[in-house]
Image (cartoon, helix red, strand yellow):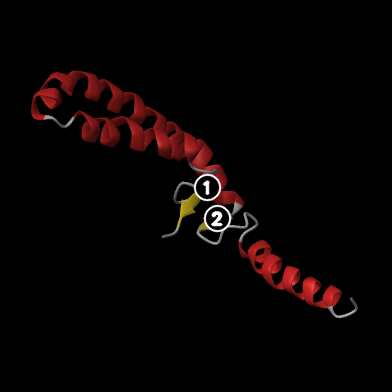
Amino acid sequence: MKLLRPVVLALLLSVGLPALASDGSGDPRYTIQNPPAFAMIGDLLIARPLLLAATVIGAGAFVVSLPFTALGGGVGDAGKALVVDPAKATFVRCLGCIGEGFERQE
């Protein structure tokens, strides 16, 4: 019984601590970016309004081009390029981050 307790404690510490030390999420396939304050301010005042405008313009271009892309079979690709990607960059990405905030590493 005296030997079991230290072995269990050592196993728990060796398995649990690397997962906690990686990035806080417990999953080493994800990284968390920690941008500086000036990047957050620039992103808030400059990049987000421009990306919002790109999302709106892209949605309009998608609607206009929809008959042609439907004939060509590229509706999904056009929707992703014109609407989804700018919207993800506008609303999903963390403030000041370069990527989407939580980027999956494979």
Question: Is 69 positioned to the left or the right of 93 in the image?
Answer: left
Answer few, some or many: residues within 10 Å of disc 1's Cα (few below 14, many 20 plus, some between 14 and 19).
many
Q: What quarter of the picture does the C terminus occupy? A: bottom left
Question: Is 39 positioned to the left or the right of 52 in the image?
Answer: right
Distance from disc 1 to disc 2, alpha carbons, whole Å, reads 9 Å
Residue 9 at x, y = what percent? Answer: 80, 72
Q: How many marks?
A: 2
Answer few, some or many: residues within 10 Å of disc 2's Cα (few below 14, many 20 plus, some between 14 and 19).
some
Mark 1 in CB contact with mark 2 (< 8 angstroms): yes
Question: Is 31 positioned to the left or the right of 19 in the image?
Answer: left
Nearer the observer, 8 or 37: 8
Nearer the observer, 75 or 13: 13
> Along the polypeptide, which appears first: circle 1 or circle 2?
2
Which SS class for mark 1?
loop
Regarding residue 50, the answer to whether it shows in the image is: no
Q: Which residue is mark 1?
A: 96
Residue 62 at x, y = what percent? Answer: 23, 24
| Amino acid type assigned to the residue bearing label 1 in the image | Gly
Q: Which residue is mark 2?
A: 33
| The quarter of the displayed image where residue 1 is located | bottom right
- Is 1 situated above or below 31? below
| Image point (61%, 60%), residue name | 23
